[in-house]
Amino acid sequence: MPELPEVETIRLQLEKFLVGRKIIAVEVRSRKILADGEKNLLGGKIIGVRRFGKVVVVDFDNDYSALIHLKLTGQLVFQGPNLPGKHTHVIFSLSGGKKLYFNDLRKFGWIKIVKSDKLQVTGFIGKLGPEPFVGQASSGQAPLTLEKFREILAKTSRSIKIVLMDQEKISGLGNIYANEALWLAEINPRRSSQSLSLSEQKTLFNSILKVLKQGLRWGGASDQAYLQPSGEEGKYQEHFLVYGRQGQICPRCQKAKIAKIKLGGRGTYFCPFCQK
DNA sequence: GACAACCTGACC
DNA sequence: GGTCAGGTTGTC
């Protein structure tokens, strides 16, 4: 799923929906998704919803937090057709008669219940790199500065797209936004990270911020399973300029068709003419 | 680095 | 039947 703009869209809606409510019951239909610990949430009141890269963190007043990763096809919804459905794996019953559903077609996602004070020193979240965003008061991650970005890129000869998607280097970017940002910056995704000039580093940094803001503005990209918690689809997929457009003329230079290759096992789209 | 694995469904 | 899919991890 869900890359930073999708998860931030989810966070914003969940914050409004969840804060102030108590957990009445948790029904776990799949232990693959939520192994244990949900009893610690019973009676707890939700005091905030944060995001670390692509992870949603729901904080409770009893010092526990729920970490949620949606991977490719996870959904956190409180509205929508056919709830619960075939792919509903966890149901949170809340005060006020409301419910929150965790759906995941491919079952790659997970929910972990941890002590709030252990959040940043254990497991997945502790390894995340800074994230490229501005003005995100409720993000838990440190903001990525241009200086830090340049430092990260200079340290490795791996291809630039692989580096952008490495959550331990930079958190939040996934396949769609990495492709879009590189296209916008006119940089070939196969280029060695450390080969970028200062001006290319700056352009790429700004392009990343730009595509993430666009994604957020359109409520994320509902290309496959992604839904907002309200049950609505995001609209950013209607604004892709390179992702999924193989064979179509480049919308910028109009001189070549968008190519598709594999890089790090992921579909990679670029214009062979204007992405140098 | 490339690849398979984790899963299910859509599409060719 | 084969390939592909907003992610991450582990194995050559």
Image (cartoon, coloured by chain):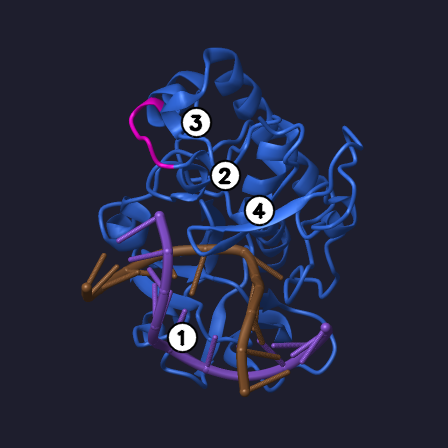
Chain colours: A blue, B purple, C brown
A273 left or right of A53?
A: right
**2 or 1: tag closer to the N-terminus:** 1
Is A105 situated above or below A214?
A: below
Q: Looking at the rendering, which quadrant does residue C10 occupy?
A: bottom left
**Chain letter for the residue marked with disc 3 in the picture:** A
Query: Mark 4 or mark 2, which is nearer the start of the sequence?
Result: 4
Numbered disc in front, either 3 or 4: 3
Would residue A59 be counted in the magenta stretch? no
Cα–Cα span, label 2 and label 1:
25 Å
**Disc 3 to disc 4: CB gap under 8 Å:** no
Query: Which residue bears the numbered disc 4?
Result: A8
**Which residue type does callout 3 highlight?**
Leu
Question: How many other residues sit within 10 Å of disc 4, few (<14), some (14-19) or many (≥20)?
Answer: many
The percent coordinates of residue A71 (x first, y second) are 48, 62
Q: Is residue A156 magenta?
A: yes
What count of labels does the image hold? 4
Left or right position of A121 against A100: left
As drawn, the label of residue A144 is 3
Q: Amino acid at mark 4?
A: Glu
> Helix, strand or loop at disc 4?
helix
For the stretch drawn in magenta, the main secondary structure is loop
Say which element carries label 2. loop
Can residue A60 be seen at all in this image of the molecule?
A: no
Task: Sort mark 2 into few (<14), some (14-19) or many (20+) by Cα contacts within 10 Å.
Answer: some
Q: Using the rendered image of the protein, determine whether residue A40 is visible from the camera's viewpoint.
A: yes
Q: Quadrant of the N terminus of chain A?
A: bottom right
Separation (CA) of disc 2 from disc 4: 10 Å
Would you name the residue on which mark 1 appears?
A33
Q: Amino acid at mark 1?
A: Ile
The lab-note entry on whether marks 2 and 3 share a chain reads yes
Q: Which residues are magenta?
A: A154-158
Please say if A147 is above or below A110: above
